[in-house]
Image (cartoon, coloured by chain):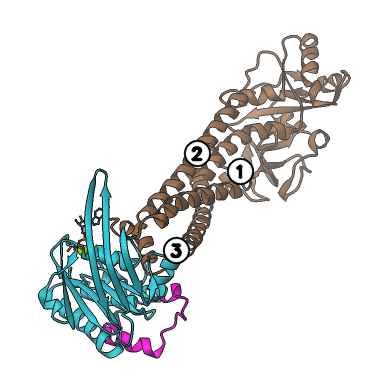
Amino acid sequence: MSEPPIIEVRGLTKTYQLGEVAVHALRGVDLEIRKGEFVAIIGASGSGKSTLFHILGGLTPMTSGTVHLNGRDLAGMTNAERTELRKTTVGFVFQKYNLLPTLSAEDNIRIVKYIGGRDVGFDPGFQEILGLLGIADRMKHKPRALSGGQQQRVAIARGIVNSPAILLADEPTGNLDSENSTAVLKLIKDLNRRLGQTILMITHDADAASYADRIVKMKDGRIV
Amino acid sequence: MILTLVGVSHGTLDQSAQRARGVGADIWFRPPGSSAIGLSSAPMSDKIPAMLMKEPDVTFAMGTMVQPLSGFDAMTGLDLDDFRKLNGGFHYLKGGPLVNDDDVIVDEYYAQQKKLHIGDTLNLVNHDWKLVGITESGKLSRICVKLQMLQTLTGNPGHLSQIFIKVDDPRNAQAVVDALRVKYHGYQIYTMEEFTSMLSISNVGMLKSFIGVVIGVAVIVGFIVVFMAMYTAVLERTREIGILKAVGGTSGLILNILFRETLLLALLGSVVGIVLTYGTQWLMKHAVPASLVQETVYDWWPIATGIAVVGALLGAIVPGVKAVKQDVTEALSYE
Ligand SMILES: Nc1ncnc2c1ncn2[C@@H]1O[C@H](COP(=O)(O)OP(=O)(O)OP(=O)(O)O)[C@@H](O)[C@H]1O
Ligand SMILES: [Mg+2]
């Protein structure tokens, strides 16, 4: 193969210790994602999808196995390096939008740009992305004043504002009606098609998964 | 809130103490059988001050005559030259000292309450007085006229109702009082300390410790209120802190934002608090005139601001650090 995968997961396990009880959320996951791919992960509730995401994003430590992101070993990273990773390599989109309620849609995006150490102005390239969002006229509004679909589109823009190598979206349409879901999924597809953004998306919904190039199924902490 | 409480307590305490201290005397000398508060008659001869001045340690004695008016007001007849010797005299905010026999000077509170201006005519004890001076309040009396004039008008020529005595060293005041009590049997002779304690409802010493407690409670409550307000405010933003971390914000950056926001908030809050004290001051002056006096305690501005800033910062940093250290996924699941 010419290029190494952007995400390479080998034998990943995660065990949550709840007092006496050990919860095996991941029991040996192997996964490869190539640059520019749009992959959907589906699986029953509790199959470990979110756990996998949190580990990929350096939000939760793994129990065993290896994860390479952009060729870098996640396990060997310090806290500061993981923070750096979230800043530059991994973008997140959550089911619950997770926008800062006190900032306008625009500033929600801008603050992440600022954290990423970028110029907080919107360059032409990013203007194009904002155009794709289809909510150019709502950018001055607070999240409260936006519909769920609009908020999620802002959250997606926030997720890619620092041009991460990969965008992780955890049930981005989980809280949305079908109309808004379609808008968000189209946007994600567009980002993948037009910008070559690598995307890994968790979903429950087969319809949503059908937007992806490849579908990965998870069951009981394993890829099946 | 702290500023208001401190202001009120300081104001109330200081008014009585200041009034007495403002006289600049060390000993208060009154005729027998008169009550501490009502000064109705003027039974002392105006020869007594001269006699008192011959006593050891006594440097000066000034006699005044007090004529009660309606309500709590009273007017005092005095000799401005003597008064100057006693304590440097009045400080005039407007106008100047008594020149003519019909002249009257009042303090700023009285002028404010009765809306008086220099040149106005006041009818007191059936006599028309011309207002020539408005003084800083806190010295002796609110309304002052010439001693002889008041003596003549009230039919008490050559009589005094109280004498203020100054001694060479305030520490000798008690000794002089003891000596005078023997010599002038039946007269009411007090050091100024005792005098102020009679003016206020309770003993000044007790009042002081009471006020100390009030201020202490105000400080503690203020601190806790600010601390708790910031604590809950930041706790509620645990999720936001989690979001900032999820998008790559470093702990330092997040705490920095939090710190600056809190500092700004605390400073703004303090300014609002200070402005509010002017509001309560105004309310007290207009709603309950002359009962409680609230002072503007400039000394306490930096202290109250300090309390607010420290309380707020601690209140913000404690949950802030907790949220920053917390697992991002946990912070994000915080409702
Ligand atoms: N912080 C945690 N502490 C303990 N157990 C956890 C924790 N997070 C997840 N788990 C457990 O790990 C397992 C996998 O959870 P995970 O959230 O990854 O599932 P999921 O596939 O995302 O499910 P869903 O579709 O409902 O979001 C579950 O059994 C869950 O209870
Ligand atoms: Mg999940």
Could you tell me how far apart the alpha carbons at marks 3 and 2 are, in whole angstroms?
Answer: 42 Å
Look at 79% across and 26% down and name the residue there: B170
Amino acid residing under circle 3: Thr
Callout 3: chain:
A
Q: Can see residue B203? A: yes
Can you identify the residue that label 2 sits on?
B220
Q: Which chain is cyan?
A: A
Which of the chains is brown?
Answer: B
Q: Residues within 10 Å of mark 2 (few under 14, many from 20)?
A: some
Instruction: Note whether ligand 1 is within 8 Å of mark 2.
Output: no
- Closer to viewer: mark 3 or mark 2: 3
3 and 2 marks on the same chain: no
Above or below B300: residue B39: above
Q: Residue at x 45, y 47 (%)?
A: B227
Q: Where is residue A211? Give x, y as percent.
A: 16, 82
Chain-order first, disc 2 or disc 1: 1
Residue behind mark 1? B109
Question: In the depicted view, which residue is nearer to us: A197 or A52?
Answer: A52
Left-right relation of B72 to B251: right
Q: Which mark is residue A78?
A: 3
- Image depth: mark 2 or mark 1 in front: 2
* The magenta segment: A113-137
User: Does the rendering let one see residue B71?
Assistant: no
Secondary element under disc 3, as helix, strand or loop, is loop
Tags 2 and 1 both on a single chain: yes
